[in-house]
Amino acid sequence: MLIAVDFDGTIVQDRYPEIGNELPFATQTLKMLTQEGHRLILWTVRQNETLEEAVEWCRARGVEFYAVNKDFPEENEQKNTSYSRKLKVDMFIDDRNLGGLPDWGVIYHMIHDQKTYEQVMFEGAGQRPEKQKKKWWQI
């Protein structure tokens, strides 16, 4: 799976332009995902020196990225300036998700076990909340 991962607020606490403290289990989870064959792309607003600091911070903790702020390592930024910066990935891990960022244990469980957020949240709870049955006129 190709996974885009944000930095500030996702891997570390958001202290931009500084680097905040690591969120619990973030780098450990990213290393496990890489070991399982997933390719990670660092997808961040950081540029130039602050971007290099973030990449080096991750590298020092054993997290290497397949690419940084692009779809693949060989992508030439000069040639593709007219293209959208939207990545072609299978999943985004970002603190700006609707509903916020689940903890890294939940993120790993979702990816490793190929489960939805709903499936993970209601595991062990015994039951899912009942969905309201629509009336025939509410189609």
Image: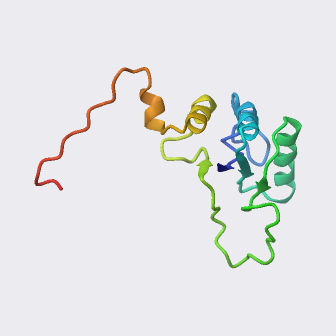
Q: Residue at x 68, y 48 (%)?
A: 6
Q: Residue at x 74, y 47 (%)?
A: 16
- Where, by quadrant of the figure, is residue 72 drawn? bottom right
Q: Residue at x 30, y 30 (%)?
A: 129
Residue 63 in picture, x, y percent from top left: 81, 40
Residue 123 in picture, x, y percent from top left: 44, 25
- Where, by quadrant of the figure, is residue 34 drawn? top right
In this view, which residue lies farthest toward the front?
37
Query: Is 34 displayed left or right of 127 in the figure?
Result: right
In the rendered image of this protein, does residue 85 appear above or below residue 79?
Answer: above
- Where, by quadrant of the figure, is residue 71 drawn? bottom right
In the rendered image of this protein, does residue 48 appear above or below residue 98?
Answer: below
Nearer-the-camera pick, 17 or 40: 40
Residue 21 in picture, x, y percent from top left: 75, 33
Q: How is the image coloured?
A: rainbow
In the rendered image of this protein, does residue 68 appear above or below residue 58?
Answer: below
Residue 8 in picture, x, y percent from top left: 70, 45
Labels in figure, total? 0
Q: Residue at x 59, y 50 (%)?
A: 91
Query: Is 69 displayed left or right of 9 in the figure?
Result: right
Question: Could you tell me which quadrant the C terminus lies in?
Answer: bottom left
